[in-house]
Structures are given as C-alpha cells and as structure tokens.
Image (cartoon, grey):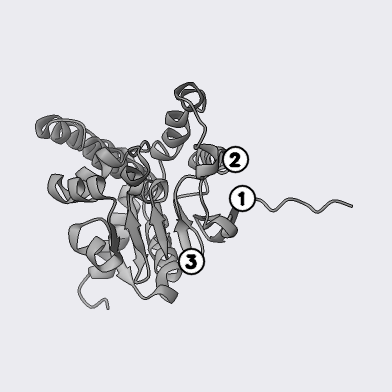
Amino acid sequence: MSATPTPSLLIERPAAGVALIRLNRPDVRNALNLELRRSLATTFETLGRAEDVRCIVLTGDDRAFCAGADLNEYVEATPTDIIARNMDVLWGAIADCPRPVIAAVRGYALGGGCELAMHADIIVAGRSAKFSQPEILIGIMPGGGATQRLTRAVGKFAAMQLLLTGDMIAAQEAKAIGLVSSLVEDEAVLDEAMALASRIAAQSPLAIRLIKELVLESMNVPLDAGLRAERKAFQLLFSTPEKTERMQAFLKRKSPGKQ
C-alpha cells in the first residue's frame, strides 16, 4: 500500500476572518518547486475571492520561511522552458490578491523566498530570520520581482549592494533598512502575525481593500494621480452603512462619562 503524498502547502483557518498558509517542504527548507508555486497561486486566488477571508498570513517553519527556488528544476532549463512555466502568472496571483497578506518569517528567506516575502504587505520577522537575493552567485538574476520590489522597499543603494553581491543580512539589519515591518523573538513570530491579522480582519472589508489597492498603486503613478484616486475612494466609503455604524459606535465610546 503506497503512502499518501504530503501536501506541499497547508491551509488553516485559525481565527475569524484569517487564513493561514504554511509552506510544507521542510526537507528542502520550503524551496519553491513548480508544484508549490502552482499551489500558492491557486490558493491565493481562492482565498482572495472568499468573502469570509479578510487577511492572510503566510509562513514556513522554524528553520526557513523559504530558501528560494528549487534549483533541481533550473540547472538544465532553457529559456524556452522558463517561458513555458508562466512564472509571471504564478507570481501575479499572489501580487494581485485583494486581501492584505502578512509574511511571518523565521529562518531563511532567500532568493525566491525573499521575493515571496516581499509580495506580502507586512513582514513580521523573528530574530533568526535571514534575507538575501543570492541569484548573482549562481550566474543569474532575480526573476520574481526583487529588482523592483526590493528597490522600492529599501532604496537604490541598499538594493544594489544586496542584488550585486548576494550578501545575506540578518533580521535586525533588514528592519533597519526598511525590509521588515516588525522584529520579534522567534517564538513570538506567528503569534504576532496572527494578532495583527485579527486586528486587520476586524476592520471594514471595503476600506481594507481600497487602502491596499491605493498603497500599491502609489508605487506606479505620479503623486497627483494617486491623490485623485485616494479622494475618490475616500468619498466612496461614505456610501456604506458600515461607515455610519462604526462612527456612531466610536462616538458612543468617547462620549463624556464613558470609559
């Protein structure tokens, strides 16, 4: 009797409005093979449409968030092979997810793993976390967005040094240069990410969605265009009953004599 294959991706629903995705290839430090990439794309597309999901947490295990691409699938690959894999579509499914995504990072986040973390909207890192884009060391370059996302996150000069040397940086330095949102003790990483996800999930779904859209759009449009889009979104939220309910509840809590 053959053993049942272990899924490379685990999906949990640990709290109201929150989905938890765990990379599950511990023997290779959660390296990204095509099967895992396709599972991630399908999962993000599904959760992004789920009305009862308001925030997503993405994590690995204690040793590694994700050690990057599975090089066994790349050593003999040709340009035609790479094109046929439609990597832009697989990465795009994560980038286009309308729900806020929190990466909970312990251990290694290297190459494609670092790029995967940068697809999140918030990165919570443990003190053991290590980040790098080491593609230059094996004769290639990043292909999952690092030349663009890393530069936007940390600026030209820090990004150039990391991309051109392949240097690995510790979580504390990643926090200092703006690559990490929060730095916590290793054992607190998932708890911190889950608490943050629950706080976000408790907010207005439409406001959450519009904020994410506009922040991401701010990296692609001039300031005046971004401000126009923000004003329209702001005005739109005044049509929602939830706005009135939340404002009334807030004012009631803050009324004189209320604690």
Tell me whether the residue at label 2 lies in contact with that at label 1, contact meaning CB atoms closer than 8 angstroms: yes
Q: Which of marks 3 and 1 is in front?
A: 3
Does label 3 or label 1 sit earlier along the sequence?
A: 1
Tell me, for residue 63, which label it has, or none.
Answer: 3
For label 1, the crowd category at 10 Å Cα-Cα, with few meaning under 14, some 14 to 19 and many 20 or more, is some
Above or below, 239 against 162 in this view is above
The CA span between labels 3 and 1 is: 16 Å
In which quarter of the view is residue 135 placed?
Answer: top left
Tell me, for residue 35, which label it has, or none.
Answer: 2
Q: Position of residue 73 (x, y in %)?
A: 54, 38
**Split into 4 quadrants, where in the image is the C terminus?**
bottom left
123 sits left or right of 191 in the view: left
Viewer-closest of 181 and 201: 181
Q: Which amino acid does label 2 sit on?
A: Glu
Q: Can residue 238 be seen in this view?
A: no
Does label 2 or label 1 sit earlier along the sequence?
A: 1
